[in-house]
Image (cartoon, helix red, strand yellow):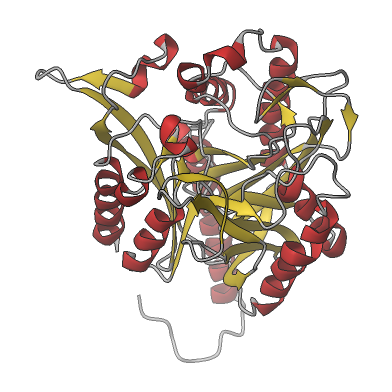
């Protein structure tokens, strides 16, 4: 349509243009509202950019509990309180839930139970839900024992506390629901740190056999992997710190409930920064704290880990200069099958985690999860006490500059050692369901997955 170049002294064209534009705008709004109502199923997040939230939930028991780690022992009090720390990340298409809980381990069946409830009640796909344990040895048992009963049957003659387990499950689910309601625009940053708070614990005797002790020359992983979540205005929201260390500053004689080093460090960093910190353990299968297995927290210097590790996390956090609100999340998983140790039995309620081949070989079905964040962060997790050489090798071969292993994830399926360390025997070998082939099977599968996704 051609409009006269002469001035419109009547206002006709101007008014007609205004009315037409108004009509088009109203039509556009109606279409937009309609599309927003129909485009997203009830349980799927709307594409609104990167959002995040964090919740901290107290799960300290009100009465005495059997503690997990070492032999069976009943708690006699509380040294420090224990928590679920929950963060939800949402890029508009994928909603990812990460939970760090101050417990030693849970059975994969316990994870499956909670994951099923999250799916039925909140619509969360299990592949988007990771439950990682800090591995403190001074916190209550949660759920049935799982695989440990095969190795340590004498330890599990008592019944686990179903009432306390129900409370732990409910608080986790309620915490996730609360975090989803609190989602707000956020930014994400990543970095590395380093701490000398750990040491290889596979001491060797003159006969070459391993025992629980200290090996200053043994393999270790002293890197801190750090993910920081900020609010849109740049103020802090949450911290995720990944470090390999057994939760065994306190020993088998200690009967007070405690988060051990991971819990004490998390509380300390939270006091300093004013936001929750999720402590995520790493490949700590052969890694101990430099002070280990003391009968009381003063002699164990539990407080010193605030400096040895807590201050190093704070330093690493300060080194993260850049954050972004342009975040893409991709969660996935695979199952690694590897032969089961000959003659080893299994637990009936873990039947989903084993199978027998046509040739009669019993296999462990090991679930491995992956989370890719943008093009530079890859996180993988497994229900293992993994030896650090394995995660170190995978990190070195990964094309992602920030590759983290989140240990004790979604259950516990034993220690997984290197072929070389199996030759030295020791405690970890006795509580491992795997053959010497397992380390290669796992490493190859994870590296192939990481390299294929880059």
Vertically, is 180 above or below 275? above
Which residue shows up at 65% across the image and 68% down it?
195
Residue 302 or residue 98, whichever sits in front: 302
- Taking 152 as reference, is 184 above or below it? below
Among the 4 quarters of the image, the one containing residue 319: bottom right
Q: Is residue 310 left or right of residue 445?
A: right
* Figure quadrant of the C terminus: bottom left
The residue depicted at 74 percent of the width and 50 percent of the height is 261
Q: Residue 133: which quarter of the image?
A: top right
Q: How many marks?
A: 0
20 to the left or right of 65: left
Front-most of residues 107 and 276: 107
Rendered location of residue 28, percent (x, y) = 51, 53
Q: Is residue 276 visible?
A: no
| Residue 326 spot, x, y in % from top left | 52, 67
The percent position of residue 138, horizontal first and vertical second, equals 74, 34
Q: Is residue 291 left or right of residue 336?
A: right
């Amino acid at each position: 349509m051609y409009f006269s170049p002469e001035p419109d002294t009547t206002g006709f064209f101007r008014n007609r243009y205004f009315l037409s534009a108004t009509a088009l705008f109203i039509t556009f709004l109606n279409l937009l509202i309609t599309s927003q109502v129909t485009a997203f199923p009830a349980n799927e997040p709307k594409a609104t950019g990167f959002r995040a939230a964090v919740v901290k939930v107290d799960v300290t028991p009100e009465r005495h509990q059997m503690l997990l780690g070492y032999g069976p022992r009943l708690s006699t009090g509380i040294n420090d309180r224990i928590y679920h720390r929950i963060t939800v990340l949402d890029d508009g298409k994928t909603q990812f839930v990460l939970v760090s809980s101050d417990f030693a381990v849970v059975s994969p069946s316990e994870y499956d139970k909670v994951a099923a409830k999250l799916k039925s009640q909140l619509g969360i796909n299990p592949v988007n839900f990771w439950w990682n344990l800090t591995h403190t040895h001074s916190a209550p048992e949660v759920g049935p024992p799982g695989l440990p009963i095969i190795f340590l049957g004498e330890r599990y003659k008592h019944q686990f506390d179903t009432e306390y387990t129900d409370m732990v499950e409910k608080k986790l689910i309620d915490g996730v629901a609360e975090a989803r309601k609190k989602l707000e625009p956020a930014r994400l940053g990543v970095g590395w740190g380093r701490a000398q708070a750990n040491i290889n614990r596979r001491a060797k005797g003159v006969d070459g056999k391993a025992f629980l002790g200290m090996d200053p020359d043994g393999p270790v992983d002293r890197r801190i992997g750090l993910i920081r979540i900020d609010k849109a205005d740049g103020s802090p929201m949450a911290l995720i710190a990944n470090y390999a260390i057994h939760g065994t500053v306190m020993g088998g004689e200690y009967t007070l409930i405690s988060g051990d080093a991971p819990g004490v460090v998390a509380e300390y960093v939270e006091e300093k920064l004013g936001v929750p910190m999720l402590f995520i353990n790493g490949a700590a299968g052969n890694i101990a704290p430099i002070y280990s297995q003391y009968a009381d927290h003063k002699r164990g210097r539990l407080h010193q880990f605030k400096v040895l590790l807590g201050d190093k996390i704070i330093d690493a956090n300060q080194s993260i200069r850049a954050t972004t609100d342009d975040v893409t999340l991709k969660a996935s998983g695979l199952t690694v099958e590897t032969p089961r140790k000959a003659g080893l039995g299994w637990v009936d309620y873990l039947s989903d985690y084993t199978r027998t081949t046509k040739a009669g070989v019993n296999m462990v079905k090991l679930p491995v999860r992956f989370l890719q964040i943008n093009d530079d962060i890859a996180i993988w997790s497994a229900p293992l006490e993994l030896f650090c050489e394995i995660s170190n090798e995978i990190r070195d071969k990964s094309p992602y500059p920030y590759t983290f292993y989140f240990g004790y994830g979604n259950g516990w399926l034993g220690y997984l050692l290197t072929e070389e360390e199996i030759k030295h025997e020791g405690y970890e070998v006795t509580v491992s369901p795997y053959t010497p082939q397992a380390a290669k099977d796992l490493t190859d599968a994870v590296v192939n997955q990481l390299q294929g996704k880059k």
